[in-house]
Image (cartoon, rainbow, N blue to C red):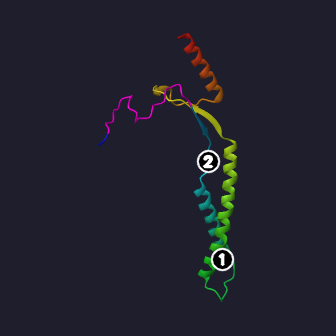
Amino acid sequence: MSRSASSTPDDPGQPESPTPSDPTQLVLRRAPRLSVFLIGGALLGVIAALILNGTQEPNPDFVEESALGFFMVTLAVPGLALSALAWLLVDRRSKKRARTVYAEPTTDYDNADFALGSTDLDELRRQSRERDAEQ
């Protein structure tokens, strides 16, 4: 049994749609992607291992590939750890630069692409109260 796509507003199963006077508080910030930092740190560790393996004299006790694998593991793990630390620092900085905006549902799509700051929201509420008082 399926419901039809067009339901009446009196339907108790449907959530009430927000009215244009109900603003929603949102926090905007540019957060860094953890995966980019981790992949970059691991790649830097692998590159350092290639350089280190290429500059060392070959040891007759070890195969060159096994030494390269050892260096890769040994240097990729600290690269991951350092890149995770760098991500934490950048993420903390992005949280300090976060700003709060208010989104309000609208049916007028020509005016839909702008953000309200907290002072704009207070002004909007004041105008709404004045409009309600006039009616």
SS for tag 2? loop
Residue drawn 59% across and 32% down? Answer: 102
The amino acid beneath tag 2 is Ala
Residue drawn 57% across and 19% down? Answer: 128
Q: Position of residue 67 (x, y in %)?
A: 63, 80
Near mark 2 (Cα within 10 A), the count class, few <14, some 14-19 or many ≥20, is some
Q: What numbered label is drawn on residue 33?
A: none
Which image quarter: residue 27? Answer: top right
Magenta stretch holds residue 9:
yes
- The N terminus - image quarter: top left
Magenta stretch holds residue 47:
no
Q: Is residue 58 left or right of residue 8?
A: right
Residue drawn 65% across and 75% down? Answer: 71
Say whether marks 2 and 1 touch (CB < 8 Å).
no
Q: Is residue 16 left or right of residue 37?
A: left
State the residue in front, 45 or 134.
134
Q: Position of residue 133 (x, y in %)?
A: 57, 12
The amino acid beneath tag 1 is Asn
Q: Is residue 11 above or below residue 43?
A: above
Spatial separation of the CA atoms under disc 2 and disc 1 = 36 Å
State the residue in front, 50 or 129.
129
Which image quarter: residue 64? Answer: bottom right
Disc 2: which residue? 31
Residue drawn 61% across and 47% down? Answer: 31
**Which of the two marks, 2 or 1, is nearer to us in this view?**
2
Toward the left, the furthest residue is: 1
Q: Main secondary structure of the magenta part?
A: loop
Toward the bottom, the furthest residue is: 61
Q: Which is more N-terminal, label 1 or label 2?
A: 2
Q: What numbered label is drawn on residue 53?
A: 1
Residue bounds of the magenta highlight: 3-23
